[in-house]
Image (cartoon, grey):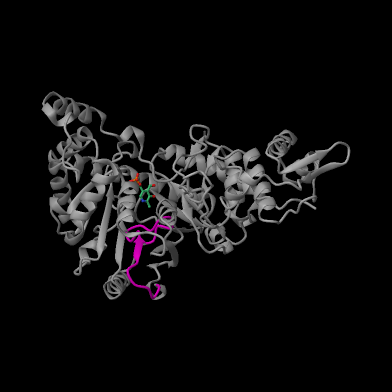
Amino acid sequence: MPLPLRLQPTSPVSLQTQIFEQVRAMILEGRLRPGERLPATRTLSEQIGIARNTAALAYERLTAEGYIETRSSVGTFVSFQIPESALYAASQNSPPSARKPRRAIGSPVNPTFRCQAVVNPHRGRLVADFWVGRPDPDSFPRKTWAQLIVKRLRTAGSDLTEYRAQSGLFDLRRAIADRLRPTRNIATNADEIVIVGGCQDGLSLVSRLMLGPGATAVVEQPCYQGAAFLFESFGANVVSVPVDDRGLDCSLLPDVRNAVAYVTPSHQYPLGVTLSLERRLELLAWAAETDSYILEDDYDSDFRFHGAPIAALKGLDRTGRVIYLGTFSKSLGAGLRLGYVVFPPELVERARDMKTLMNNGQPWLEQATLADFMTSGGYERHVRRIRKLYLSRRNALLAALEKHFPGGEIIGDEAGMHLAWRLPSSFPPAREIEQRAIEAGVGVYTLTSGAAVGFDTSPENDRYLVLGFSSLTEREIAAGIARLAEALAPVTDRKHRPKRLVVEC
Ligand SMILES: Cc1ncc(COP(=O)(O)O)c(C=O)c1O
């Protein structure tokens, strides 16, 4: 009988390890019974379309760890003696509901948590890579940054040798507050802000303040992995609420108390829709009624291409229920590891203490340089410049998609650094398209590869591709989509086939 393996060729985990882990899980969960015969490596490699050596290496590892045994000239079988040490690791790859948080005897490591995809496994190996959410490396204001950083270094005094305010440099907090008022309609001040190492650090900070086993974390369906997996790792009960074309469906919010609801209202991650005003008000009312907090992740709101920027949810909050997260990972770069959290006044002190407990605050020099960049007006000019650049790139992507896949259903393109493409029903699933594209040297990504998680397992999750456009030139975008169309021509409907099969790179 063929083994029901689900291999992800685009995963950073090698195929050999994926086979090893999946077969091991089948054995430990009783889906493969002691003494049961496994297919020969040749048969397995033919069934799933991999090199025979890959299958052989996976079997070798399973044999070495005692899960299977080979009887010469008879075949390969599941061992009768499963190694005891394996039992606690059984649940690592199964869905959260199936996992029991069990720890190894003698080991303090929690084996059950999952973590988000941050590093592109194909980086540098593709002709055109539509990896999501990365600023153009050439856009970083290197020259100005170098001048500002050197100036601060010269005058640093004890700033580099002392601990400074754990909630972050005052100048930077003030500059952020001054910017949030006009741009996001958030009336705040430096005292309510804590500087963190990007949104992820802010999410960790809030999770440490509010979540633990038994707590409820509400997330969007689909949701950013970095948030959902983090909440899971705290033992929270993660409840997903579907997103439609007006954002989170607030009529489906759970009837619980003291929950934390994580949302991306300006540009839902990954689908890109904007939470409607009516639903924003509904969400705020739910939080007030249930004594819950809303975690607003405003990760890419600097890039809204049409009309006035939409005010943040926090700007509508009259009852102190919204915790606002901002990051410089999108406007400047993820390498800076700088972001901020705006807390309701009653939480600020506890948040500051927790930040101290976590890491005694963020590096001083980067904070000081960024504060100077903001107060000099350089940051605002930089954002205006790259917004224009990303708008042209978004337009180039829309034009290329329309040229090669006319009438395609594109969502989330009004803002941000990526858009989502809902595939026509005549197209194969997104997973297959991603694979074909990668083989042709083009990176387009399923929701899962694009760091999103779908908590329902409906096939709908495999009908979307996400395409980032901010780090590709217009020429690269046009060439990449032409190449994609060529790669997909054999599997797409006639009407969706590219008219000219020209690869322009
Ligand atoms: C939804 C969402 N939030 C936040 C972030 C940024 O995280 P950080 O600020 O930790 O770099 C990302 C980055 O990909 C994201 O997609």
**Image height of 351 relative to 483, above or below:** below
Q: Nearer the viewer, residue 321 or 135?
A: 321
| Residue 61 in view in this figure | yes
Q: Find residue 381 and report its horizontal and vertical position in percent.
A: 20, 41
**Residue at figure coordinates x 80%, y 53% from the top left:** 1
Q: Which residues are magenta?
A: 254-273
Q: Is residue 375 left or right of residue 296?
A: left
Per the image, is 264 magenta?
yes
Q: Dominant secondary structure of the magenta stretch? A: loop
Q: Nearer the viewer, residue 264 or 464?
A: 264
Which quarter of the picture shows residue 426?
bottom right
Q: Nearer the viewer, residue 31 or 227?
A: 31
**Residue at figure coordinates x 51%, y 38% from the top left:** 121
Q: Is residue 299 left or right of residue 401?
A: left
Q: Find residue 260 and report its horizontal and vertical position in percent.
A: 34, 63
Q: Nearer the viewer, residue 265 or 398?
A: 265
Q: Is residue 142 left or right of residue 148?
A: right
Per the image, is 261 magenta?
yes
**Residue at figure coordinates x 77%, y 42% from the top left:** 46
**Image height of 24 relative to 454, above or below:** above
